[in-house]
């Protein structure tokens, strides 16, 4: 079984070094490591040029979406059976890939994901997951222990994709740039009847998102602190995904926009961030979908 790893990076050299070293140290070795460098200018390219065991592709900064588009396409065209995808701030547990291997032989059409654990607090999940069995959102490692979480995954953080899926469903939408491209790929899998499973015994460590959480028995809302580039693309892509996928409800998108707006006003207290949010919403409404949908045959 031929497996390639794909890592996308931009100006995070020290994190990239940790990520690559964790892939090199896997108990089950990958056949090739692709690093997609989005024109980093922090010494990343110079370091990459010294690494003889890496396949480096440097391109203009196309964001995470454009990076995984290039990386997955490159690995697919080399004929790999499975492609293991992660951002440059992921650190793979030494048995992360080995723990996925038994499942790859059982179902060669499913997409599997490692459990993404907080780098700062190993008792918590970095992003959280939905457990379809208990019908609950879980954010602690103990609640995911010894489970296969079906229909839930943190895509592009230890996500292993079969070439059968790429052949059938295409590549990530590079026009989404960042914040939403991973969810689009997840929705595309669901809409094509492809099973998505998070394997709790396979661990990836990732920095936790800085957030503000409101939670009680009836209501749960998580506001993410982010720079204006991510704020713009998050709101833009959220609207685009609503237009592309019927299962995303309009009231959920409107609710998210309102709550994010209130948090920006009362927590961040900057109208610049509010402007970026609504600029993204506006462009998401009026952009031509043909500019986005590049689900290319491969």
Image (cartoon, rainbow, N blue to C red):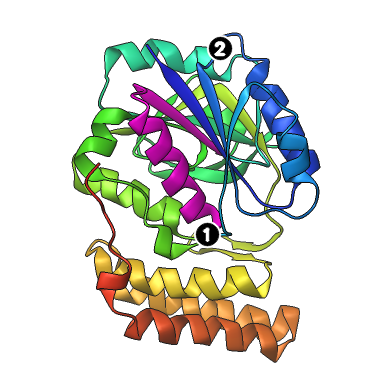
Does the magenta segment cover residue 297? no
Dot 2: few (<14), some (14–19), or many (≥20) neighbours within 10 Å? some
Mark number for residue 62? 1
Vertical placement of residue 200 versus 118, above or below: above
Q: Are marks 2 and 1 in contact (CB under 8 Å)?
A: no
Q: Nearer the viewer, residue 114 or 49?
A: 49
Secondary structure at badge 1 equals loop
Does the magenta segment cover residue 77? yes
Q: Quadrant of the N terminus?
A: top left
Residue 257 location (% of width, % of height) = 48, 79
Q: Is residue 197 visible?
A: no
Please report the bounds of the magenta region as a residue range.
63-86
The quadrant in which residue 184 appears is bottom left
Secondary structure at badge 2 equals loop
Which residue does the image show at 73% across and 78% down from the upper left?
Answer: 267
Earlier along the polypeptide chain: callout 2 or callout 1? 2
Relative to residue 161, is residue 36 drawn left or right? right
Which residue does the image show at 62% across and 86% down from the upper left?
Answer: 274
Q: Is residue 239 visible?
A: yes
Which residue does the image show at 56% across and 52% down from the upper left?
Answer: 59
Q: Nearer the viewer, residue 1 or 199?
A: 1
Q: Quadrant of the C terminus?
A: top left
Which residue in the structure is indicated by mark 2?
A: 29
The quadrant in which residue 289 appears is bottom left
């Amino acid at each position: 079984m031929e497996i390639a790893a794909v890592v996308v990076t931009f100006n995070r050299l020290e994190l990239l070094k940790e990520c690559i070293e964790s892939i090199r140290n896997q108990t089950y070795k990958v056949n090739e490591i692709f690093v997609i460098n989005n024109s980093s200018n922090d010494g990343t390219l110079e370091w990459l040029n010294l690494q003889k065991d890496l396949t480096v592709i440097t391109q203009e900064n196309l964001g995470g979406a454009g990076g995984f588009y290039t990386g997955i396409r490159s690995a697919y065209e080399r004929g790999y059976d499975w492609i293991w995808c992660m951002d440059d701030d992921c650190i793979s547990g030494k048995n992360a890939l080995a723990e996925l291997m038994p499942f790859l032989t059982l179902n060669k059409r499913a997409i599997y994901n490692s459990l993404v654990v907080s780098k700062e607090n190993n008792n918590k999940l970095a992003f959280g997951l939905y457990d379809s069995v208990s019908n609950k959102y879980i954010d602690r490692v103990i609640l995911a222990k010894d489970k296969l979480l079906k229909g839930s995954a943190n895509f592009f953080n230890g996500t292993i994709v079969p070439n059968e899926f790429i052949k059938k469903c295409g590549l990530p939408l590079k026009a989404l740039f960042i914040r939403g491209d991973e969810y689009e790929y997840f929705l595309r899998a669901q809409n094509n009847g492809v099973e998505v499973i998070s394997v709790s015994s396979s661990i990836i460590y990732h920095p936790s998102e800085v957030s503000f959480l409101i939670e009680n028995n009836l209501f749960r809302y998580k506001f993410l602190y982010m720079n204006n580039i991510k704020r713009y693309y998050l709101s833009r892509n959220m609207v685009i995904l609503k237009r592309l996928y019927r299962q995303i409800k309009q009231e959920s998108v409107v609710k998210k926009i309102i709550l994010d707006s209130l948090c920006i006003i009362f927590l961040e207290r900057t109208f610049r961030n509010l402007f970026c949010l609504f600029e993204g919403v506006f462009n998401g409404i009026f952009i031509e979908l043909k500019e986005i949908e590049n689900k290319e045959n491969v």
